[in-house]
Image (spheres, grey):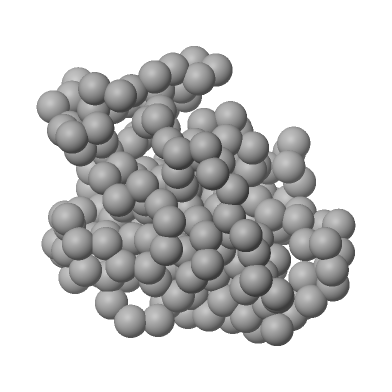
Amino acid sequence: MKKIFSICLLGLGLILLVSGAVAQENYVNHGVAGVKGLHTRAVLPPHDIFSNCGTGCSSYDTASGYYVSGLTGEGVGQTLAVGFTPTQTLTFRFALTPNTNYTSESAEISAYLLNGTATGGPTTQLAALVQGGTIPDYPTVRVVRYHGRVKVVKGTTYFLCETEPTSDATMLWMLSNSDTTSPFWFQDAGACTGSDITWLNATGSIAPAFKIRAL
């Protein structure tokens, strides 16, 4: 049985790290344990495709995050994907996500843009992204930039996926303050794509914080 001192196993198997300061505010939403957030909505500057964490991804839950884990780390193999749908056809430039290195292993996150649908989940790879800079050790959180350049089409759903390729490393992807409507899927295969991956739908849980920027 996994540790429960600072780790909550969510109803769908999704693993969330919650600090002691907020653990008493847990609640259950659609059978999934979450963390209460602020009911605010960000004002988006021009050329933002999506943001649930404000301008520059500066507004997010600093105390709680989901595991992004290697195959032998805490939250074994947990890989996360959150969806967005552009309202214009644009060129994706980068994604911003708040991350921290929970196990302090020397490692990076592998991030991808995936094709998919809101109701069916992620499917094939659209683009591999490049991490900019290092991810600090827990409890310090850094908003990390994941670069790429690929066309995204108006009205089409895409997913930002984060996975951990280092087997014994565990990262955290911090939660948004209140986003429970973005498509949110996860699996424990330790990869964003593959023929043997089964994605599980966690939509309705608080989504990880992320911002998508276009040219």
Image quarter of residue 85: bottom right
Up-down relation of residue 65 to residue 140 (above or below): above
Q: Quadrant of the N terminus?
A: top left
Q: Quadrant of the C terminus?
A: bottom right
Q: Is residue 43 left or right of residue 209?
A: right
Q: Position of residue 112 (x, y in %)?
A: 56, 66
Q: Judge by depth and name the residue closer to the eye, 24 or 200.
A: 24
Q: Position of residue 183 (x, y in %)?
A: 65, 42
Q: Residue at x 41, y 52 (%)?
A: 60
Q: Position of residue 25 (x, y in %)?
A: 30, 24
Q: Is residue 87 left or right of residue 19?
A: right
Q: Residue at x 52, y 31 (%)?
A: 205
Q: Is residue 132 left or right of residue 39?
A: left
Up-down relation of residue 170 to residue 27 (above or below): below
Q: How many marks?
A: 0
Image quarter of residue 157: bottom right
Image quarter of residue 204: top right
Q: Position of residue 134 (x, y in %)?
A: 28, 77
User: Is residue 115 among what the camera can see?
Assistant: yes
Q: Residue at x 33, y 23 (%)?
A: 26
User: Is residue 194 among what the camera can see?
Assistant: no
